[in-house]
Amino acid sequence: MASKRLGEIMQSDRRYLFQNYGDRLPACFTAGEGSLLYDQDGRRYIDFFAGIAVSTLGHAHPGFVKRLQAQLERPIHSSNWFYNREQAAAGKLIGELSFPGKTLFVNSGTEANEAALKLARAHGQSISPDRYEIISFEGSFHGRTFGGMSATAQEKIRRGFGPLVPGFTYLPFNDLAAASREIGRSERVCAVITELIQGEGGIRIADREFVKKLTAMCRKRGILVIIDEVQTGIGRTGRAFAYQHYGIKPDIITLAKGLGGGVPIGAMHAQNELSPLFGRGVHGTTFGGNHLACAAAEFVLKKLKKPALPKNVAAVSDFIFGRLTAMKAKYPLIREIRGMGLHIGVELSIPGMDIVTKALAAGLIINCTAERVVRIMPPLTISMKTAKEGMKILETILASEVGV
Ligand SMILES: Cc1ncc(COP(=O)(O)O)c(C=O)c1O
């Protein structure tokens, strides 16, 4: 039963907002500190979700608050007609954390992918007008705009919006033979776009061999490799970017989610030689990389460069994987544990939403993806103490599910 305060908020939600998110989970957060959140009635929750892997530094991080407050007293926006110190600083840091190249700032993950898809098409057309095909993989998620949606090889995302952008080919994930066949057969391929951990697809991890050989195959044929790091980037998997676990050199990476620590921002970062394809006036956005968003990104990226954050991710990740492995031995409803760093999926034999709802009622925020996969993605700053408390709640819920 919702409290009076929450009831009022729910009522105005239904009255004034599109109901495209359906019934939301019954909480409205009004305060937060670190990996804790407090709802409209002051109830405390442990945040194992970070707003879909966004709140990299948790909530109300003192240094972050100070930096954003300082920026609020300066221009927060001036447009891309002007030079922007924060934008260049954030671009420099992305290059230092990934590979030397050029960055283009946008406002979301799907826009970062739009930019990458356009850059890939521009690259293809620079070779031949027929070189426009883009390969993506089943189970992927690349966003909700027309380009992002067209690249997303999940029928449930695309249904009802046709015709979509032509020129996309969907192949089975982790199937090197299928990729090799398509690349060998078609002269039209200009790019491949893939996640390395399919987040919305159920925390499915790309095989190392698949990624390495696919990348080598693409390199040989001048096909661009776009790694969608929207969910896996910014330290989420224990390295700054997931591709760094694979020993590959992408042509383009796309970022968003954790980049602004909660302030909306996305980015496409590409190898230097691709940047002339986006000459003056070819692509752009009004808000992309404004002073406030880039001040946020600069702060987050500076934190990511220091050893403390990756060290914490490694320690908490080891602890959570350890606890989950022990729980799997005890509770047969855990089918599989997958993930890297603090990007963790627990595949269950029952619908994950039941567990999410029960966890919320018990003061733990987790998420469900791909029907049966419970997703754990806390802020990268989460303390071991809070992680322990959260795992205890999760275990209590799973134990009660199997009647232990
Ligand atoms: C891998 C991946 N790409 C792209 C997107 C789209 O990002 P946004 O919702 O910011 O447009 C998402 C969002 O979940 C994602 O996980």
Image (tube, grey):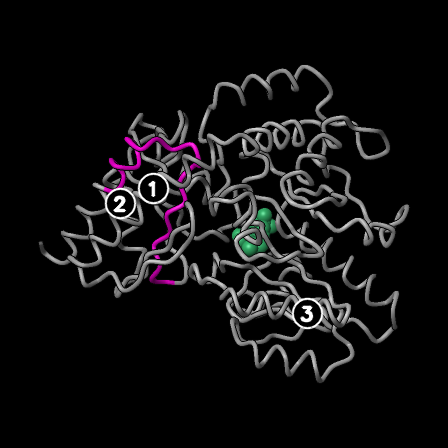
Give amino acid for label 2.
Ala
Tell me whether the residue at label 1 lies in contact with that at label 2, contact meaning CB atoms closer than 8 angstroms: yes
Vertical placement of residue 12 versus 137, above or below: above
Residue denoted by label 2: 359
The mark lying in front, picked from 2 and 3, is 2
Residue denoted by label 3: 164
Q: Earlier in the sequence, mark 3 or mark 1?
A: 3
Relative to 258, 130 lies left or right: right
Identify the residue shown where x is 78% and y is 79%. 187
Give amino acid for label 1.
Ile
* Disc 1/disc 2 C-alpha distance (Å): 6 Å
Is 360 a magenta residue?
no
Is 386 a magenta residue?
yes
Tell which of 41 and 333 is nearer to you.
333
Tell me whether the residue at label 3 lies in contact with that at label 1, contact meaning CB atoms closer than 8 angstroms: no
Give the magenta range.
371-391
Vertical placement of residue 62 versus 311, above or below: above
Q: Earlier in the sequence, mark 2 or mark 3?
A: 3
Question: Which numbered circle lies on residue 312?
Answer: none
* Horizontal and vertical percent position of residue 83: 83, 29
Identify the residue shown where x is 72% and y is 60%. 117
Give amino acid for label 3.
Leu
User: In the picture, residue 319 is in which quadrant?
Assistant: top left
Q: Residues within 10 Å of mark 2 (few under 14, many from 20)?
A: many
Identify the residue shown where x is 74% and y is 27%. 77
Residue denoted by label 1: 365
Tell me whether the residue at label 2 lies in contact with that at label 3, contact meaning CB atoms closer than 8 angstroms: no
Residue 322 shows in this picture: yes
Relative to 23, 86 lies left or right: right
Q: Earlier in the sequence, mark 1 or mark 2?
A: 2
Identify the residue shown where x is 66% and y is 39%. 94
For the residue labelled by badge 2, is the local secondary structure a helix, a strand or a loop? Answer: helix
